[in-house]
Image: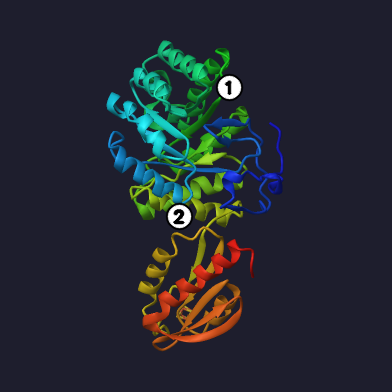
Amino acid sequence: MPQVALKTESLSLTKFHAHKIVKLMNIVRKKTRLIQVGDVPVGGDAPIVVQSMTNTPTDDVEATASQANELIEAGCEIIRVAVPDEAAAYALPALKRRIPAPLIADIHFDHRLALLAADQGADGLRINPGNLGGTDRLKKVIRKAKERGLAVRIGVNSGSLEKDLLAQKERSLADRMVESALRQVTLLEDWGFADYKISIKSSDVRTTLDAYRALSEKTDAPLHLGVTEAGSMTEGTIKSSIGIGMLLADGIGDTFRVSLTAPPIKEMRVAYGILRTLGIRERGVELVSCPTCGRCRVDLLSIVDDVERKLAHIRSPLKVAVMGCVVNGPGEAREADVGVAGGKGIGILFKKGERIRKIGEAELVDALVSEVESMTRDIDAGGP
Ligand code: SF4
């Protein structure tokens, strides 16, 4: 498969203006086929796209649109909604009017729901061919997607492999997952359908890595990354950061979702944290804080919690340091765009390396937040 180093400066899609796209370090991203999911390009030279899924009842239009918009505000570029019944499918037109991002209908078991969701205006379909009930039904869904110009994600999951593959216990699970995906790909290609991406997820990180790496060798379709059922905020963040992060570092993956048993908005922070750490894309505040130790004389844990919460709306990529004392504090705070180093019941505020002033502990959070906000206004206005 061809490998290309991305020319990131060429990625001037206005859609992505809020996200600074940074140099890809030494990551050589595999060149995949470009597809369109609504108006968002996925694969090829397009930026790696962050997506998520709402967890409200889809036919509760108010709740679903509100959660989707909160996700979009936090950087989500494609929204997926569950379509478990007709009511959810019929809610799609109203959702589309209120959600300014491509809307993917997530379908299991009942191919008729996929047909209905397509007719109701979904921008894409996520199906698991393993549970759709046969090739004829898959063909109907693909024919409909083709007719309506929709992208389809083939979502292979280690928990729902075809029976014959499940029985082949002597083969690795990753190997069987790849075969399952390629079987579907062969059908799609035979039917002349190319607007698909593939995911091949397991809740086991090593299986996920093996499966994606092997699949990436065998297809130029864009890949959607994820570690399925990753777990709680802590467990899921660890598994997703390692699973998705290692694949992205390999140059594999065109879009991804961090799955957490947590409010979906939390996925955005982890997603952009992964991208920032790898030097792929930047968005929002990178918060540097120390673990605290016996020298700390301010309540740093709650200060950091408050700062993180109050800066969650910032889009500009900025580094903010919140340090417990003067040992490493001034150094880190000077390195950051804005920082504080704690003292005894006080903090010393730094901005762009300059010591600004001393602030009482009670005012520390608000002072830091207002410095950051004024700095982002400066940045947006093209100032210092
Ligand atoms: Fe301890 Fe100070 Fe280091 Fe924080 S910055 S861990 S309080 S020495």
Q: Secondary structure at mark 2?
A: helix
Residue 352 sits above or below residue 167 on the image: below
x and y, in percent, of residue 215 in the image:
56, 31
Quarter of the figure with residue 120: top left
x and y, in percent, of residue 58 in the image:
31, 35
**Label 2, on which residue?**
269
Q: Residue at (52%, 75%) from the top-left corner?
A: 339
Q: Secondary structure at mark 1?
A: loop
**Label 1, on which residue?**
194
x and y, in percent, of residue 324 in the image:
45, 79
Q: Residue at (37%, 20%) from the top-left corner?
A: 116
Q: Residue at (55%, 82%) from the top-left corner?
A: 330
Q: Amino acid at mark 2?
A: Arg
Observer-nearest residue: 180 or 45?
45
Ligand 1 within 8 Å of the CB at mark 1: no
- Residue 91 located left or right of residue 175: left
Residue 40 sits above or below residue 357 on the image: above
- Residue 330 located left or right of residue 33: left
Residue 236 sits above or below residue 222 on the image: below
Q: Quadrant of the N terminus?
A: top right
**What is the basis of the colouring in this image?**
rainbow
